[in-house]
Amino acid sequence: MSRIVYVNGQYLPEAEAKVSIFDRGFLMADGVYEVTSVLGGKLIDFDGHAVRLARSLRELEMENPISKEDLLQVHRELVSRNGVEEGMVYLQITRGAPEDRDFVFPDPETTAPTVVLFTQNKPGLANNPAAEKGIKVISIDDIRWGRRDIKTVQLLYPSMGKMMAKKAGADDAWMVQDGHVTEGTSNNAYIVKGHQIITRGLSNDILHGITRAAVLRCAEEAQMEVVERPFSIAEAQEADEAFITSASTFVMPVVAIDERKLGSGTPGPVAARLREIYLEESLKQAI
Ligand code: PDD
């Protein structure tokens, strides 16, 4: 069965879905995106993703072409038409396709944004065996632009970072700026020391993860101490535990950083517990 995707108001088989070669997402990475996970056929943290999407659009002076209610409806329709039980919904909005290539933004009166959504089926997302084993990360320089709080489709460097990790026999990369970890290539980064969960505070240096917000809420409800401050790779290598969070990995333990094992080199109890609580809470609130 061919996947049904959404393009500018239409539901189409993926092979029939098309966007223009002049689309600014394609030519200039002039677009934003969201990834919302699906568990049990329901959307996790939909509201948070919709709010962040609206903010990303605002920050780039792009009009929001779709209301939250309509967006929810499209997400649900795609999940249902494609029979997704576990997986993700990917959404992308670009500044649209003017008649020619031009650095100057097109007039929104004449150029409508491009709205694309598709699903990715990922059975086993919640019971991911990687969570039992943990992942290995390497450190790389963070050479991205200064507005990482906007979820743009400029993903070349994160993509190169994943490739650097792969070549080094690791699973992901943590990016470092001025001696401190900013975030993972597509996730937020944390360490655990004693009773403290330490993660960089929110600023333009990192994406304000929707999973991050939910996990920190879970941690506080579970009486765990959360400290928002920068940390270095050296400090992380001495930590008791480390983990990442994102809509596609939830809470994922990190067991080695630059080939240095953390503790015994197996996932720690704090990450495991947070994963459990986060999944439980998210499922309760899924819509
Ligand atoms: N990535 N930091 C970066 C750079 C990210 O790309 C992501 C998400 C996160 C975590 O955000 P959230 O918890 O809202 O998913 C942090 C998505 C999953 C992706 O690009 O596929």
Image (cartoon, rainbow, N blue to C red):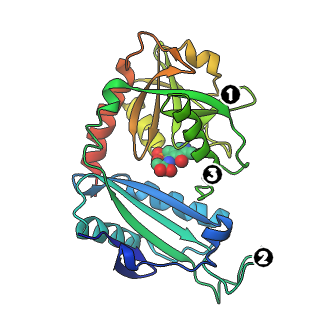
Between tags 3 and 1, which lies in front? 3
Q: Position of residue 164 (x, y in %)?
A: 59, 36
Q: Is residue 80 above or below residue 178?
A: below
Q: Which residue is mark 3?
A: 156
Q: Position of residue 87 (x, y in %)?
A: 31, 53
Along the polypeptide, which appears first: circle 3 or circle 1? 3
Residue drawn where x is 35% and y is 62% of the image? 119
Instruction: Estimate how packed mark 2 is, as few (under 14), some (14 to 19) or many (20 or more) residues with alpha carbons within 10 Å.
Output: few
- For this view, does 244 lie left or right of residue 232? left
Q: Distance from label 1 to label 2 (Cα)?
A: 35 Å
One can see residue 129 in this view: yes
Q: Nearer the viewer, residue 240 or 114?
A: 114
Along the polypeptide, which appears first: circle 2 or circle 3? 2
Q: Distance from label 2 to label 3 (Cα)?
A: 22 Å
Q: Which residue is mark 2?
A: 104
Q: Nearer the viewer, residue 218 or 152?
A: 152
Circle 1 SS class: strand
Q: Nearer the viewer, residue 242 or 204?
A: 242
Q: Amino acid at mark 1?
A: His
Between tags 2 and 3, which lies in front? 3
Residue drawn where x is 31% and y is 45% of the image? 282
Q: Amino acid at mark 2?
A: Val
Disc 3 CB within 8 Å of nearest ligand 1 atom: no
Instruction: Estimate how packed mark 3 is, as few (under 14), some (14 to 19) or many (20 or more) residues with alpha carbons within 10 Å.
Output: few
Q: Which residue is mark 1?
A: 180
